[in-house]
Structure formats: C-alpha cells, structure tokens
Image (cartoon, rainbow, N blue to C red):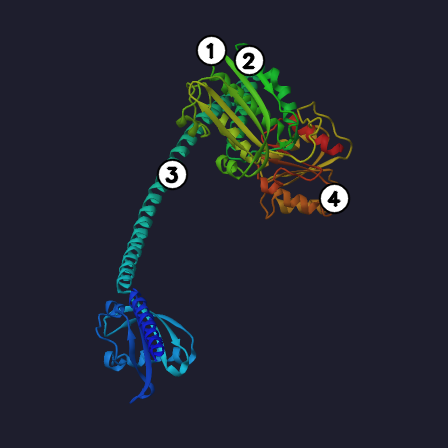
Amino acid sequence: MNDASDSRTDADAARAYALARYRALFNAIDEGFCIIEFFDGPHGPLSDYAHIEANSGYERHTGIRDIVGKTLREVDPTDADRWIDLYGTVLRTGVPARFERYFLTAGRHIEVSASRVDPPELRQVAVLFRDISGRRKAEEERDRAAASLRALNETLEQRVAERTAELMRAEEQLRQSQKMEAVGQLTGGLAHDFNNLLAGVSGSLQLLSIRLSQGRIADVDKYVVAAQGAVRRAAGLTHRLLAFSRRQTLDPRPTDVNRLVNGMTDLIQRTVGPGIKVEAVGAAGLWPALVDSGQLENALLNLCINARDAMPDGGRITIETANKWIDRRAAQSHDMPEGQFLSLCVTDTGTGMTRDVIAKAFDPFFTTKPIGMGTGLGLSMIYGFAKQSGGQVRIYSEVGQGTTVCIYLPRFYGDADAEAADHAASPISTAEAGETVLIVDDEPSVRMLITDVLEEAGYAVIEAADSVAGLKLLQSNVRIDLLISDVGLPGGMNGRQMADAARQTRPDLKVLFITGYAENSVIGHGRLEPGMQVLTKPFAIETLAARVRQLVQR
C-alpha cells in the first residue's frame, strides 16, 4: 500500500516538474505565443476560436492582457472574419503560414508564423508572432526619404541638364568664335600671299606686253621667268592648302620608308648645314606603307627644316622609323583607328614648344618664326597629308628639351616596289602617226593649252566641254588612244564616271585625270584601275607630254 502511494507521489512530482519546466520554457520565448482552438459558433462551423494558452510575450507584443479564455470575436470583432480565414486555412490544410498584418485591436503591425497542432481533431493552431511596428515605421520613413531623394534627383538632373545645355551653348559660341578667328587668319594669309604672287604675274605680263610693243625682245625672257616663278609659288601655296584640307591629289604607292629616308639623308644634311648632325635610325623589318612618296619626302624635309630653325646654335636631328601596334586606348589617345602602323619620327635637341604652341601648331598660317621667315603652312600641310593618307601626326615636346614630331602611316600588306615610278619631266617626245587624244574639260583656256602642247607633239586632238559630249565621242567609232579629263565636269557625270562608262565599249582605254584638287571618292581614294593616272593642276607642259607618251605607249 505504501509502495503504491509512493509511486503515485513520484509520478505527480515528475508531472509537476515537467509542467513547470514547460511553463518556464513557454514564458521564456521572447516572441508572443499562443494556442488557439476553433469551435462552432453563431456564425457557422469553425467560425470562432478561443485562446487556450498564451505566454507572457503575448502581452508584450500586443498590449492585450489576460488573453487566455477570450475568443477572437471578443478581442477583434471588426476583423474577425479575416483572422478566421487565415488560421482556418492552416487548420484545414496543415500547411504552415507566414505573413505580416496589421492587428487592429492592438494597433500594431505583427509578423506571424502559424502551424496546426496535430492531431487535426484537436482543432488547434499554434501561433508565434512579434511586434514589427518599429521596423514598419522605419521602412515607411526610409520609403519617404527615398521618395524625397528621388524627387531631389529628378530636379537635380533637370538642373544639371539645364546647366549642361548652357555650357554646350557657351562652348559652341567659343568654337564658332575660334572658327571665325581661324578663317580670318586663313583668308588674311591667303590674301597677303596671293596678292604678292599676283603682283609678280601681273607686273611681269604688263612689262612683257610693253617690251613687245616696243620691239625690245631682249628683255622678254626675264619677265617670262619672273611670271613662271610666281606661278610655281602660287601652285606650291595651293598644294599646301589642299594638303591641310586633305584634298590634295595623292599618288599612293607601296613604299619602303627606310629606303626613302636613306635616300634623303644627304639632301637633309646639306639643307640643315654643318652645325647640325643628322642621324637616321631605320627599324629592322619595317613594314611598307601605301603612301605618296613625293609628298612624304616633302613632309620629312619640312620637319627637318623646322627642327633646324629650332636649333640656332646647332644640335642633332634624329630620324627614326618603327612598327607600331595601335590598340584601342592608344587609338583614342592619338585620335586614329586601331591597327598596324609604321611611324616616321623627327627629333631635335632645340628649344621645344609650350602647350599653347603645340595646340596651335597645325593651324594654317600659324608660325612662331619672325615675319618673312615662314608661311605657317608646313605643319598644317603635314597634318593634312597624314590624315588624307589614313594616318596621323603627333607632337611631343618639352621647353628646353627638344621636340619630336611623328607621322603615323597605315601598314601596307604586300611588298614595296623596288623602284618607284618616276614621272619627272622629260623632253617632249613626238607622237606616232594617227595617235588621237580626247580632251574633256569645261575650262576653255585649259583645253586650248593642252591642245597646243599635244598638237605640237604630233597628236590629233579632239575637244569636249562636258561629260555628255565626251561620252558621245567615246561611244562612237572615232579613234581615241587616250582620254584626258577633268574630274569635276558639267553634264551629270564626273570624269571618273564618264571614263568607266567609256570602258564598257573601250576596255583598253588609257585615261589621264587632271584636277585642281583631289575628289578622292570620285577618283577612287587614290586606287585607280590599270591604265589610269592622275595629274595635278597646274603642271609643266613637259610633265604633261611625258605622262601622255608613257600612257599611250603602254
């Protein structure tokens, strides 16, 4: 009897201990926790629930005291149906739920985790929740701050856009002002130089006329020489201007730049004088370049003369060549395309240039030399030539340390010609019997001069003033051994189009284009078909005759 009593006592003590431990753990949960039990009420089956258990955290997170024993419709009658729907779904499906919701009676936002208490027949759901009102308030404040920031950003972007537009207008006005200043400098320099040249030509012609009327033929030659000299200087000036504008007529050929430099070293040394040492350093395995070798020689000589003028007390000029791989970053820095280039650099040990001088160095007629010592077109011509050749030119300089000017030229994929074609002037040769030349030019004086030169050489000459008349002759049965045509022609076709149309019926037709400037897209970007050549106006009659003879004899 005592043993049974002792067993019951021990069991009661164990249950009491377990319940106390459960209750301690239950209340130790920081979040609110309760167990609700559904029952059938006036609103239908499972239409209400009672709070059968709750920990102390329930009051902390809701502010509602003594919740155990109270039903939902007592606590929150207004929003009871929504709570029934949420927890009833958990009870029916057994699927736990997590959600955030505003608890109207408590006046707080709560975050809830709910799960069914098995077996389902108990009709119970365990609810764990916590007050998140502070977090929601912080989120709302954050959202308000973000909205304010967005509004500020929108107005800031508008202000920045307005300021940027204002700066762009000011920059455009500055560019326009600089452009007009450059145009004024250009036109002023042109007017000055051409007035000097025209005075020489006009004065020589007037005195020539007077001497001829007086019968003083002995004095005629010097006026002819003076006029021709002025014309040559005018031609040189226009060529430099066209080079700057990238419209000069180029005759690009595969060129070994090392061979070109070596062939000019003696000339450069004589030009700069004995007080300056000239060194040529050619890179081994230098790539060939597709370039007008004559214009490249002029550019190199100009650079060496500029280097000489920067070293009045003597010094050293170094001419270097190198192969260059221009990557994207270097291309952006040098304002040139990516790819393989070769460089031709001239370095002096002279006075150097300031940043302001470098910025203006390529402007036409800009010069730091005394009046009468330079035209200011040398570097601008080199710049235009390099750009027209598909390359670039750059200046590197420090005051007192010297200057390096580098011309970058695109690599030619092929072999350079061992010997460049020489179109230099030669004695006028006579034509063979019956050889006929068609001249198409809209300038009567040009046609007259070419006709006189060729007829004196024995050619039969036919003239046309526009492309329509020229093409009609070319499509006839008239013998034509050579077409000499201006590039820019009236009549709806340019010279290249007329020549191409003529070659449909005369595939072996030889063509010599004569032009005052390079309409590169018209004549083929310097890449003419076999049997086609270009001659730049003005030209010596000996050069014209030699070029005609060369083409006809091919």
According to the image, label 1 marks what residue? Answer: 313
- Residue depth check, mark 1 versus mark 4: number of the one nearer the observer: 1
463 is higher (above) or lower (below) than 60: above
Q: Is mark 1 on a helix, strand or loop?
A: loop
Q: Could you say where residue 267 lies in the image, as x and y percent from the top left?
A: 60, 16
User: To which residue does mark 2 refer?
Assistant: 277
Q: How far apart are marks 2 and 1 (CA)?
A: 12 Å
First-in-chain label (1 vs 4): 1
Residue closest to the far top: 274
Task: Please name the amino acid that badge 1 sits on.
Answer: Asp
* Mark linked to residue 175: 3
Q: Which of marks 3 and 2 is nearer the N terminus?
A: 3
Residue type highlighted by circle 4 = Pro
> The C terminus is located in which quarter?
top right
Which is nearer the N-term, disc 3 or disc 1? 3
Residue 336 place in picture, x, y as percent: 52, 37
